[in-house]
Amino acid sequence: MKIDKSWKDWVDENGKNVYRTLFVKCFYEDDESHQLSEKYDVRSYPTGGVPCSLGSSGLENDVCRIFDLYHICEKFVGFETEDLINYLGAIQGGSIHSIGRLKSGEFFRIKKVRGLEVLFPNEALLENQKVQKR
């Protein structure tokens, strides 16, 4: 995770620098993502992803990092597109290989939630990534 050192004015009570790391603010769950979590076992995603599954190593790497977030949440959820861009950019040194493909609708669905664009996984992604059914 990239550490943002531009926040030099942030100090603790002893006057020592405190740095922040970029991460997603929150996650979203709707009926469809809840049903995916009920149907598929998030823990069954292969460590390191599924090579040669999405046609681009950049996209495969990005999806692998997104599945890391699903593991943390212990379910399939949606994330704000802007948060995903920041998260993926931070762990990859600022480059996003595949945001266009992520938003294409092939493996993720997009919803507007209070004006925010949120990306949710769809069943095609879970099937493609060999996530096992419960």
Image: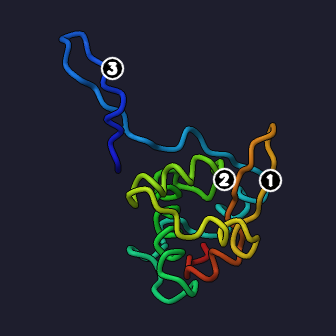
Q: How would you rate the neighbour count of disc 2 (Cα within 10 Å): few for under 14, some for 14-19, many for 20 or more? A: many
Q: Name the N-terminal-most of marks 3 and 1.
A: 3
Q: How would you rate the neighbour count of disc 1 (Cα within 10 Å): few for under 14, some for 14-19, many for 20 or more? A: some
**Label 3's element?**
loop
Foreground residue among 57 and 113: 57
Against 2, is 91 above or below? below
Tell which tag, 2 or 3, sits nearer the viewer: 3
The residue under label 1 is 111
Q: Would you say 121 lies left or right of 64 here? A: right
The residue under label 2 is 78
Between the residue at mark 3 and the residue at mark 1, the CA separation in whole angstroms equals: 35 Å
The residue under label 3 is 10
Q: Identify the residue at image location x=64%, y=54%.
A: 77
Disc 3 marks which amino acid?
Answer: Trp
Q: Identify the residue at image location x=62%, y=45%.
A: 27
Q: Name the N-terminal-most of marks 1 and 2.
A: 2
